[in-house]
């Protein structure tokens, strides 16, 4: 992380230290190059209490059928009924809404706010 990136990251790191961000390790290649397998991210679990998810946001979501699986995906679109279409950046390596359909906004566990490469 360069000097400028570190300065931009300081507020999120401070919120992590205060327990307002959660650190996760990325597993899998479906979101490369944005999120690398084995990398770390900080997630804001309260992000969607303040604003609705927007296309382009990278989110942490519950898997709709497997309760033990969490997914990092990009919001592709949001319907007026609160349903969210999720997509991996690497379509050839991703299980996403093309496979399992849309998810409820209540299935979203937070928005990725900081990536460690």
Image (spheres, rainbow, N blue to C red):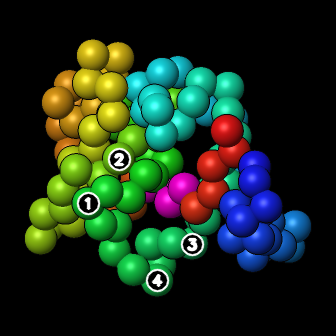
- For the magenta stretch, what is the residue range? 108-112
Could you tell me which secondary element the residue under label 1 belongs to? loop
Query: Which callout, 4 or 1, points at the residue further toward the start of the chain?
Result: 4
Q: Crowding at label 3, few (<14), some or many (≥20) Cα neighbours within 10 Å?
A: few
Image quarter of residue 10: bottom right
**Residue 66 locus on image (x, y percent):** 44, 27
Q: Disc number at residue 55?
A: 1
**Residue 20 locus on image (x, y percent):** 74, 71
Q: Looking at the image, is mark 1 or mark 3 nearer the viewer?
A: 1
Who is closer to the viewer here, 73 or 11?
A: 11
Query: Which callout, 1 or 3, points at the residue further toward the start of the chain?
Result: 3
Image quarter of residue 114: bottom right
Distance Cα–Cα, label 4 vs label 3:
7 Å
Proximity of marks 1 and 3: CB atoms separated by less than 8 Å: no
Is 52 left, or right, of 25 in this rendering? left
Query: Which callout, 2 or 3, points at the residue further toward the start of the chain?
Result: 3
Instruction: Identify residue for label 3.
Output: 46
Instruction: Identify residue for label 4.
Output: 50
* Residue furthest left in the image: 80
Query: Which callout, 2 or 1, points at the residue further toward the start of the chain?
Result: 1
Q: Residue at x 49, y 48 (%)?
A: 60
Q: Looking at the image, is mark 2 or mark 3 nearer the viewer?
A: 2
């Amino acid at each position: 992380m360069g000097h400028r990136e570190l300065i931009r990251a300081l507020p999120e790191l401070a919120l992590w230290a205060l327990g307002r961000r959660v650190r996760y390790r990325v597993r899998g290649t479906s979101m490369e190059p944005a999120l690398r397998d084995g990398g770390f991210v900080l997630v804001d679990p309260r992000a969607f209490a303040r604003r609705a998810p927007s296309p382009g946001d990278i989110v942490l979501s519950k898997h709709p059928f497997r309760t033990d699986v969490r997914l990092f995906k990009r919001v592709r679109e949001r319907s007026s009924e609160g349903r969210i279409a999720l997509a991996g950046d690497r379509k050839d390596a991703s299980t996403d809404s093309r496979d399992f359909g849309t998810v409820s906004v209540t299935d979203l566990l937070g928005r990725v706010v900081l990536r460690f490469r």
